[in-house]
Image: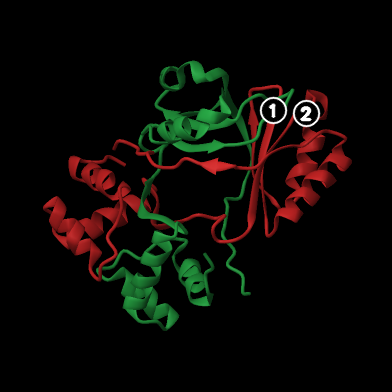
Amino acid sequence: MNLDTTDRRILNALQDGFPLVAEPFAQVASDLGLSEDDLLARLGRMKEKRVITRFGPFFDAQAMGGAFCLCAMAVPEAEFEIVLTKVNARPEVAHNYERSHRLNMWFVLATETEEEIEAVASSLERETGLRVLRFPKLREFFIGFRVAA
Amino acid sequence: MSIDATDRAIIAATQDGLPLVPRPYAAVAKTLGLEEKTVRHRLRRMQETGIVRRIAVAPNHYALGMVANGMSVWDVEDARVAELGTEVGALPFVSHCYERPRALPDWPYNLFAMVHGESRAEVEEKRAAIARLLGPACRGGDILYSTRILKKTGLRLRPREK
């Protein structure tokens, strides 16, 4: 999809936030010098074409309750597919990426409680005979990310 | 902060996004049998307490040409990691920035910053910019590129009743 200057202005403006007022699109449109209809139509088109991944509130999953932990394993190449099958079989494994490093398998565990994180990680260690390194987040620094459109 | 059943219902109704209609909060309220003002009030309160980080658009990085990314990792002096992590997290090309425990001896790194760019070369330039920002408080770093997505189910919040 080709984005014109107006689409780009909309994307850049709405990455910074969206007002909590009764008619927020009218307010944003006015700030950008657009009509509300035009703004809604452009957003609809960008969402449909998947230029917009998501539009709405972003929640802090941990603040909601639930536990998350980034984990990593150094999986020997010969065992990679076998270990992968065992890891991915767990519904608690939310994402899993192969990465260019000795620690070559990186996944996120998402469970209801901290105890379950430990239980799943230990159980995977027993099942695979490999260490599962745990990297829970200690602190989050989240402010800046913007994609210049 | 604790959230109640109403907050959970609002989260469940909006985690896929807000409807693209002139009064989106009223539309959400209607599906939940709530007042429009209640929805806005609750969202504002959750924003103040950090449960809602922001209400905004997330553009598709790939559609905008940001096709390269790497997980940069750094061994930063513990005494300075909070201050420097805040600065790294504020960089416009860093999407996620966390302090995590080291796993010695295998893993000396305690600061993780996901870096995005239009090419591998651009990601490397940005990685160098982070190294300059960290300066001598940083004893080493690395960057891990993903070579394959092995599983991606997405982190779905599952609001549960208490």
Outermost residue, left side: A33
In the depicted structure, whether residue B67 falls above or below residue B11: above
Q: Which mark is residue A75?
A: 2
Image quadrant containing the C terminus of chain B: bottom right
The picture's colour for chain A is red
Question: Is residue B21 visible from the viewing direction of this image?
Answer: yes
Inspect the image, locate mark 2, and give the three-letter code of the amino acid beneath it: Val
- Discs 2, 1: same chain: yes
Give, as a three-letter code, the residue at label 1.
Asn
Chain ID, green in image: B
Pointers 2 and 1 in contact (C-beta within 8 Å): yes
Of B10 and A114, which appears nearest the observer? A114
**Measured from the top left, where is residue B59 in percent x and y?**
37, 45
Which class describes the residues within 10 Å of circle 1: few (<14), some (14-19), or many (20+)?
many
Local crowd size for mark 2, using a 10 Å CA cut-off: few (<14), some (14–19), many (≥20): many
* Residue B105 picture quarter: top right
Pick whichever, B105 or B31, lies toward us: B105
Q: In the image, is B108 to the left or to the right of B91?
A: right
